[in-house]
Image (cartoon, rainbow, N blue to C red):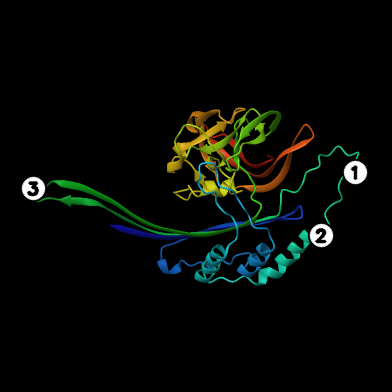
């Protein structure tokens, strides 16, 4: 008979700061994951994680930003207020205290980076320039910090042998017993201030990156304020990722897209990762409810479920990188970040978070 015990522990940390002042952008992010395995529970230990940005620095960064004033949609349902109120900052302080973490030494480094935001902006193009003139989308600060931790243990018992009975028979026996226990916990804080970007997620189904068609406009209430906005349509091969929350068979406004209100579609989608594997797939209950949506000129259009489109999993990791989407010498949007999704046949496609000009 043999007995095997195994203990595992892991932690995943994600922290991002995305802020803009005076048309200049600062982005800082880190994503760390570690896991250890041992035959002894006593050998499992992690050094405490330290946030990259302290609560004092976060408070000072958000203090000078304008207060967000979203309006209520036509049906009276509230729209989220992303102002960094005292309650949000208190939650951040409490999380840092509970986790026993201080990161004041990071402030000096961050101060140097933030000073760059106050540097003079690049001079505007001359009157003869053909580059499109674009006004600043507004100052904003988006900060997110999350910690996921898990611990598990397994027990494996195996036995085999032969027994001789009194009547001379020989009986071979075998036993294989497996026991598994897994504990999972998570904590997160999100603070937003200033202008809220409208960045819905787009899946590119035909290999090419997202493109916008300025000749075909779409009338759609992207920011859920009760008024339709005019925006460039998606070129062929791309579709918005949508969730028909009220089950009426159509996408009513930006609340049923990922990122249109929060400014971070990947974070919105991550909230549905029930099994914590870093993908939205058939192991998550929301997967069967997700739809690909290509709106028509009236903001309607067909909804297609993911499996019918051959999509098997959507990754939650992304790489930050801005890219302007110009159509007919006009800025119609900006790519903010890019991730991947997997087709059922194993091929890979891209997911992009696009800030649409409305």
* Quadrant, the N terminus: bottom left
Q: Residue 41: x, y in percent? A: 41, 66
Measured along the vertical axis of the image, is residue 97 above or below residue 214?
below
| Image quadrant where residue 21 sits | bottom right
Q: Which residue is mark 1?
A: 126
* Quadrant, the C terminus: top right
Disc 1, SS? loop
| Image quadrant where residue 329 sits | top right
- Measure the alpha-carbon separation of dots 3 and 1: 105 Å
Q: Earlier in the sequence, mark 2 or mark 3?
A: 2
Disc 2, SS? loop
Q: Residue 269: x, y in percent? A: 53, 46
Disc 3, SS? loop
**In the rendered view, does 191 fall on the left or right side of 285?**
right
| Of marks 3 and 1, the one in the foreground | 1
Identity of the residue drawn at 64% across and 66% down: 59
- Measure the alpha-carbon separation of dots 1 and 2: 21 Å
Q: Earlier in the sequence, mark 1 or mark 2?
A: 2
| Of marks 1 and 2, the one in the foreground | 1
**In the rendered view, does 166 fall on the left or right side of 139?**
left
Query: Do residues under tags 1 and 2 come within 8 Å of each other at their CB atoms?
Result: no
Residue 47 versus residue 205: which sits nearer the camera? Answer: 205
**In the rendered view, does 306 fall on the left or right side of 325?**
left
Q: Which residue is mark 3?
A: 167
Q: Which mark is residue 260?
A: none
Q: Earlier in the sequence, mark 3 or mark 1?
A: 1
- Measure the alpha-carbon separation of dots 2 and 3: 95 Å
Q: Which residue is mark 2?
A: 119
**In the rendered view, does 232 fall on the left or right side of 293?**
right
| Of marks 2 and 3, the one in the foreground | 2
Measured along the vertical axis of the image, is residue 133 above or below residue 83?
above
Residue 143 appears in view: no
């Amino acid at each position: 008979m043999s007995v095997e015990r195994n203990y595992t522990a892991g932690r995943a940390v994600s922290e991002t700061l995305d802020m803009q002042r005076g048309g200049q952008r600062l982005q800082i992010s880190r994503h760390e994951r570690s896991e250890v395995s041992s035959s002894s529970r006593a050998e499992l230990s992690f050094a405490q994680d330290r946030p990259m940005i302290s609560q004092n620095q976060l408070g000072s960064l958000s203090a000078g930003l304008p207060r967000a004033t979203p309006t209520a949609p036509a049906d009276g349902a509230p729209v989220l207020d992303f102002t960094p109120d005292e309650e949000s900052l208190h939650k951040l302080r409490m999380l840092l205290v509970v986790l026993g973490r201080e990161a004041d030494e990071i402030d000096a480094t961050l101060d140097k980076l933030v000073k760059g935001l106050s540097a003079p902006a690049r001079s505007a193009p001359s009157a003869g320039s053909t580059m499109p003139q674009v006004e600043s989308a507004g100052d904003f600060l988006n900060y997110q910090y999350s910690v996921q931790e898990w611990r598990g243990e397994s027990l494996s018992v195996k036995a085999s042998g032969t027994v001789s009975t009194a009547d001379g028979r020989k009986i071979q026996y075998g036993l294989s017993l497996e026991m598994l226990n897994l504990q999972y916990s998570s904590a997160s804080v999100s603070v937003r201030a200033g202008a809220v970007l409208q960045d819905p997620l787009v899946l590119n189904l035909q290999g090419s990156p997202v493109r916008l068609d300025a000749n075909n406009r779409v009338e759609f209430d992207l920011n859920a304020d009760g008024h339709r906005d005019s925006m460039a349509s998606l070129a062929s091969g791309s579709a918005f990722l949508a969730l028909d929350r009220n089950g009426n068979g159509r996408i009513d406004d930006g609340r049923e897209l990922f990122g249109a209100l929060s400014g971070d579609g990947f974070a919105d989608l991550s909230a549905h990762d029930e099994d914590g594997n870093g993908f939205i797939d058939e192991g998550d209950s929301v997967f069967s409810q997700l739809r690909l949506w290509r709106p028509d000129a009236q903001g309607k259009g067909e909804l297609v479920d993911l499996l019918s489109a051959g999509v098997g999993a959507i990754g939650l990791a992304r790489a930050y990188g801005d890219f302007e989407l110009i159509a007919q010498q006009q800025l119609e949007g900006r790519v903010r970040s890019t991730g991947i999704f997997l087709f059922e046949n194993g091929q890979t496609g891209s997911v992009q978070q696009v800030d649409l000009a409305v």
